Amino acid sequence: MAEQLIQGIGVSDGIRIAKAFVLREQTEPASIREEIAAEEVEAELERLNRAKEQSEAELTELAEQAKQTLGEQQAGILVGQARMLSDPAYYPQIEKRVREELLSAEQAVSAVTEHFAGRFERMDNEYMQERAADIRDLGKRLLSQLLGGKRAGLADLREEVIVVADDLAPSDTVQLDKRYVQALVTRMGGKTSHTSILARSLGIAAVVGAGEAVREIADGELLIVDGSRGLCIRHAEPETIEEYRRRQSSEQSELSALERFRSLPAETKDGVRVEVAANIGTVQEAAIAAEQNAEGIGLYRTEFLYMNSNRLPDEDAQFAAYREVAERMNGRPVVIRTMDIGGDKELPYLNLPKEANPFLGYRAIRIGLDRKELLHTQLRALLRASQYGNIKIMFPMISSLEEWRQAKALYEQARRELVQEGVSVSDSVEVGIMVEIPSSALLAGSFAKEVDFFSIGTNDLVQYTLAVDRMNEKVSYLYDYFHPAVLLLIRQVIEAAHREGKWAGMCGGMAGDPLAAPLLIGLGLDEWSMDAGSIVKVKQAISRLDSRDCRTLTDRLLQLATTEEVRQELLRYTESQPDA
């Protein structure tokens, strides 16, 4: 057969060559009876109830398994599915279809599940669209119980394979074992799907959203997956296989060369140390960060706690997640950002208004200060967890001193309440802001007198400084953190912090770019936070540098007028540095 290239979305890097393990659904729609007689209603409801109870038991068992292997966050996905069985918009509607429309239990489950999932798919937000897969996963579980079938799983794998599926359900992902699962290829999915997030966390190469061609892949056939290019290759020619084996060997050699930096501090040739931390969104990613020897968590995106649930997480649920991350980091600093909902992150149960410019609208701290009970609950949970580790609290999207002071007042109120209730709270919690709006960068001198730290969010700082929608492909060529205006703002923030004896960090994409390392060393950035997979690469880049040379270089870079001039000068300087 002719070699076939299947193009998808590369969401986790790596080259893998292995046999396909095709994960097929065992429940066939054709086997579902459609209608029942009136006298069968009670018996049908009894069948349905047994399936519900069995599904709840399965989900409870899987959630416990996920908690042990993947952490509270991934377990929460399954707990959310179990809760959905009690959601008045879901399970009671299935019963109603059986009782009033005389649908079979199977047909009622299929109809209500598809209706419920469709509501999520019609939302504008990509993340919420992908939650439809969670609902369908629950529906398939109910159907499997009704039909007496056993769903295909990954737990029995004992050889290296590339898993091929329409998509991986949450109940599949908790069974992933990276010793055997070399790569993932899915027909559906996007960069924010559970499958993508988990693949990146586990370091499994993955291509998602590869389309209908995925359904033609046969169990046991040899596949090549190139995660960086978003490519899956079938029926590869011998020379293609040989080329990819060479590339795979080269990739492994590069990783081996980087490995020695995992246990080393981030330190320049002349002995200047900086703190290299990880950005995370789940408890499991904290474990990955610890494995990568991250010196802390520079950004814990707490919104995933809200987005992985069909209701607001209460204080105890949040406390459990924050405590687990703090304990996993074993005394290393953990900077936790209060909820950054809004913009491209919608929550159906909050009924947020539709906005023409959501990134400039009702989001992040603006919601927290308007709906104070949400922020108050989160601050109480954070303070309760503070005694279990080195937690620092960061407010996002601060544009004025008034907002900072209101947020700080809510923090102080929550602390007073807990102390009065006799709850133990750490007395050394630092509270700072994320600098992502030009106004806060320009006012850094005033902020620095009141906050404990700054963390520069370059992703949004670039967007707001350059008036460039970072999600818009048409203007993506304008989006660049090496723009001279952005560099001047970053310098202003770092210098303002140091004048007041405070530390300045960075949690945007720029921190994880080895090319930016000479510039950030020259600017005196104290803490660098990035995806865990970038840590060893950045440590290696820092090890090649002399801080005195970097300061001289930075002075020169800040005199340049264009982004391209800055980038080319950094490339020339980096290429001139000897290997560490």
Image: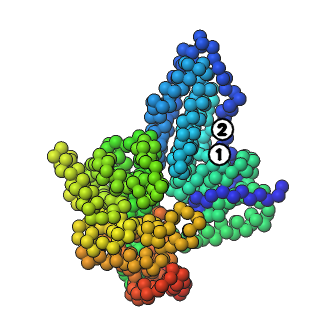
Q: Earlier in the sequence, mark 1 or mark 2?
A: 2
Taking the spot 58% from the left edge, 53% from the top edge, the residue there is 190
Do the residues under discs 1 and 2 have CB atoms within 8 angstroms?
Answer: yes
Q: How packed is label 1: few (under 14 Cα within 10 Å), some, or many (20 or more)?
A: many
Which numbered dot is residue 95?
none
- Looking at the rendered structure, the secondary structure element under dot 2 is loop
- Residue 296 x/y as whole percent: 37, 63
Which numbered dot is residue 25?
2
- Residue 492 x/y as whole percent: 34, 77
Tell me if I can see residue 286 in this picture: no
> Toward which corner of the image does residue 115 lie, by quadrant?
top right
- Looking at the rendered structure, the secondary structure element under dot 1 is loop
- Quadrant of the snapshot with the N terminus: bottom right
- Residue 545 x/y as whole percent: 45, 82
> Toward which corner of the image does residue 8 lie, by quadrant?
bottom right
Relative to 88, residue 269 above or below: below
* Left-right relation of 229 to 380: right
Taking the spot 26% from the left edge, 78% from the top edge, the residue there is 499
- Residue 93 x/y as whole percent: 51, 27
Amino acid type of disc 1? Asp
Relative to 516, residue 157 above or below: above
Q: Which residue is mark 1?
A: 166
Taking the spot 60% from the left edge, 43% from the top edge, the residue there is 154
Relative to 492, residue 411 above or below: above
